[in-house]
Image: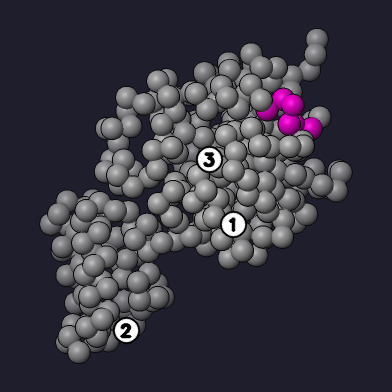
């Protein structure tokens, strides 16, 4: 036995992270240790005198070294919560952010309405990554089915695994595709959280993002809008009448993405802010022909 208690291990972890400049050292230390040792949120209070063994201390030490190197907490743990899901992460997937839940929550009433009106809602998630957006919608709205596309075979394998973990694998299909290249059929909702960071900015991002999120999921081209142009050009032939196109966007991209969609025959029907008050979600439908 190492002789180190849970409370002492937490305090030492907090100090180590703080001394190396981790901004949320206390929170990160608590999340890491709780996740690694499968502890409840109250364990640090109720079980603080518990003595940790050598293997547990080694596991914590290795994880702290990774965090000091700026690897995000949830990547170290290999999973994170999103909506009601428990999502596995992999090097090929973007780590889902809480703001992306706004996109899911915005679509839930629309998907629910479509199920009520037509008995179906088929969803296409372009650049699915972990599958977060599509799988959350399948979980929240009974009767929906979904297809997730990605260029990365590793991401698709992670999405399939997450569909299985969260009990929606029978309603989800993962397809390797460059946007619509391998997509067939039409959908009621087409959604994407595409790469939208301006290329020249990618190298200036925080280490946690720049070093650990896949570049494929970040780099949006010279002006950050390449993906929106590609999607807008092909979305019309895969969208059912009265269907919806939904995007996550960068905080300053609302007008530009709206213009791109307007040029391709779509009208914006909704714009929703994120938890920080920035523009984050846009919804479009085919514009009425005058």
231 to 96, vertically: above or below: above
Residue carrying label 3: 151
43 to 257, vertically: above or below: below
First-in-chain label (3 vs 2): 2
Q: Which sits in the foreground, 236 or 259? A: 236
Q: CA distance from mark 1 to mark 3?
A: 14 Å
Q: Is disc 3 in contact with disc 2, using a CB cutoff of under 8 Å?
A: no
Label 1: element kind:
helix
Q: Quadrant of the C terminus?
A: top right
Q: Which sits in the foreground, 257 or 146? A: 146
Label 3: element kind:
loop
194 to 135, vertically: above or below: above
Q: Is disc 2 in contact with disc 1, using a CB cutoff of under 8 Å?
A: no
Secondary structure mostly taken by the magenta-highlighted segment of the chain: helix
Residue carrying label 2: 47
Q: CA distance from mark 3 to mark 2?
A: 46 Å
* Rendered image: mark on residue 160: 1
The residue at 33%/32% (across/down) is 202
Q: CA distance from mark 2 to mark 1?
A: 37 Å
Q: Is residue 48 left or right of residue 224?
A: left
Extreme residue toward the top, this view: 290
Label 2: element kind:
loop
């Amino acid at each position: 036995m190492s002789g180190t208690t849970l409370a002492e291990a937490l305090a030492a972890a907090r100090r180590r992270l703080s001394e190396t400049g981790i901004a949320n050292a206390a929170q990160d230390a608590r999340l890491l240790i709780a996740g690694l040792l499968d502890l409840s949120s109250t364990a640090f209070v109720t079980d603080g005198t518990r003595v940790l063994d050598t293997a547990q201390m080694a596991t914590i030490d290795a994880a702290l070294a990774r965090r000091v190197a700026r690897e995000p907490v949830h990547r170290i743990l290999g999973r994170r919560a999103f909506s009601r899901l428990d999502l596995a992460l992999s090097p090929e997937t973007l780590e889902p952010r809480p703001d992306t839940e706004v996109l899911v929550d915005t679509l839930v009433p629309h998907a629910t309405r479509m199920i009520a009106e037509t008995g179906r809602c088929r969803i296409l998630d372009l650049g699915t990554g972990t599958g977060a957006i599509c799988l959350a919608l399948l979980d929240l709205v009974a009767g929906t089915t979904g297809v997730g596309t990605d260029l990365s075979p590793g991401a698709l394998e992670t999405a399939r695994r997450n569909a299985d973990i969260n009990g929606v694998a029978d309603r989800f299909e993962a397809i390797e595709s460059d946007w619509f290249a391998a997509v067939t059929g039409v959908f009621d909702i087409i959604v994407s959280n595409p790469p939208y960071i301006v290329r020249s900015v990618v190298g200036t991002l925080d280490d946690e993002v720049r070093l650990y999120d896949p570049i494929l999921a970040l780099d949006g081209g010279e002006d950050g809008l390449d993906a929106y142009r590609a999607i807008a050009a092909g979305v019309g032939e895969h969208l059912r009448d009265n269907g919806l196109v939904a995007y996550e966007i960068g905080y300053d991209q609302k007008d530009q993405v709206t213009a791109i969609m307007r040029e391709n025959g779509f009208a914006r029907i909704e714009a929703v802010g994120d938890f920080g008050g920035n523009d984050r979600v846009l919804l479009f439908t085919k514009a009425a022909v005058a």
